[in-house]
Amino acid sequence: MLNANPKPAPAQTDIHNDNETPCVKLSLKPKMHPVVAAFLKREDALLDMVDAHGSPLNVIFPEIVRENIQSFQDVYTRNNIQGRIYFTTKPTKSQSVIKEAALCDVGVDVSSYNALKTTMGCGFAAERIECTGPKNKEYLTLALQQNVTINIDNFDEFDQIVAIRKALNKREKTRIFMRVTGFESARLKFTSQDGTFGMHLKHAPQIIEKLKAHSDDFDFQGFSYHFVAMAAEQRIVALENILQLSIDAMKQGVDIKGINIGGGFDIQYAQSREDWLGYVDKIKDSLRHYGQAVTWNNGGLGFRNEGGLIKGAPAFMDHAKALTGAQEFESLIQTPLPSFGHMTMADVLNDCLLELYIEPGRAMVDGLGITIGRVNFRKESTHGETLIGLDMNRSNMHSTHQKLLTDPVV
């Protein structure tokens, strides 16, 4: 069985309403790359692999990362934008994927000391590497010794780098980004949650003064920020804020190459958005007692019935976003910016001769892996539901706290 499904109680639960309409099976087909679909047809080879390597077995198709990267590169080409895509190592532990990415025209974003060492061993040259995340002295020292780009998160980190550079007697300038947060707008109430990434925009004068005071130490690439579940309107505000900050800094004599808008671009897990929306509706309908339970013990997965009204919020991600990650990226850079006379971000970047850097994260590894679990047993639950026990546990399937609801392939 492939991709254990935590949502329905029985695998073949039927839904019916009080009007005795035909039963409809609750089903959500996963979106699957043709390479993966072709592999699953080789049943004998698949079973042999599980016998040889055990269950659960993760199978990776590194060549798919090239297509994912190309989809974002095409956006740069169509919009005549210069800059760099940073492949992010955090979503994958597979060195085969990192090595494949190293053969493409991208940089790489690492977020730890060990990730930096691994990435250099996988073929990424120093000028293609960007260090992000929390950084201790060892991580910063290795980054400076190897002359990689550092995305600075706070003032203490900035001062540490200056001190370590002095101790190492570094003469070559260190490439840096400065990560900011605390976006605001007069036209929009921006109530983003407090986070751990970046320096607040209210400290912009101090940031600019530090950059000017240490221009001999640093080759400033530009300001950056980290997406944390922003709504579309909030993303526009973040873009306007970072562009305005860049323009203000340039007016004060700071040399800037571009802006780094991070990632947060979506993955499509389900094959059909129509099926996905219907799937969620059926979960809500079951809570209204319009049919049989369609989840284990009729749990609402975040929804609940209060006096006939369905309240709450989904405890799962949207499995079928309207746009792919690359399409979402293109939509973002083509959206008019009210603070810039409704010019698009692409137009503003080109007018200001600024480059654009992105870190697409999970969107780079979309669709390139499967998890195979051997069936150990079948049994009947207390309430007569059919249970299927796999030779794996929940942590083998869930890398995040969010539930994956697409059907397994049996």
Image (cartoon, rainbow, N blue to C red):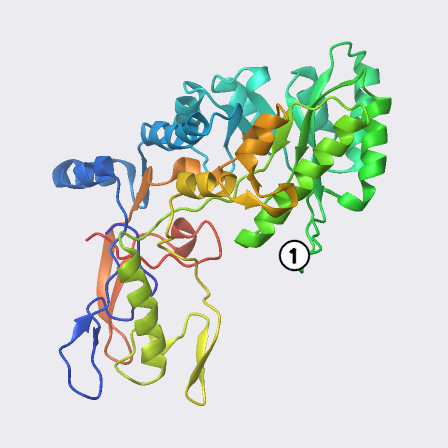
x 41%, y 57%: residue: 318
**Residue 372 shows in this picture:** yes
Q: 38 or 378: which is nearer to us?
A: 38
x 33%, y 65%: residue: 7
Residue 221 sits above or below residue 19 on the image? above
Residue topped by disc 1: 192
Residue 178 quadrant:
top right
Mark 1: secondary structure: loop
x 46%, y 29%: residue: 79
Q: Callout 1: few (<14), some (14-19), or many (20+) C-alpha neighbours within 10 Å?
A: some
Residue 363 quadrant:
top left
Residue 312 sits above or below residue 216 on the image? below
Q: 324 or 90: which is nearer to us?
A: 324
**Going by the image, does 106 lie left or right of 28?**
right
In the image, farthest residue toward the top: 171
**Going by the image, does 127 lie left or right of 181?**
left
Tell me residue 284's x, y (percent): 36, 76
Tell me residue 247's x, y (percent): 72, 32
Residue 259 quadrant:
top right
The three-letter code of the residue at mark 1 reads Ser
Tell me residue 268's x, y (percent): 36, 48
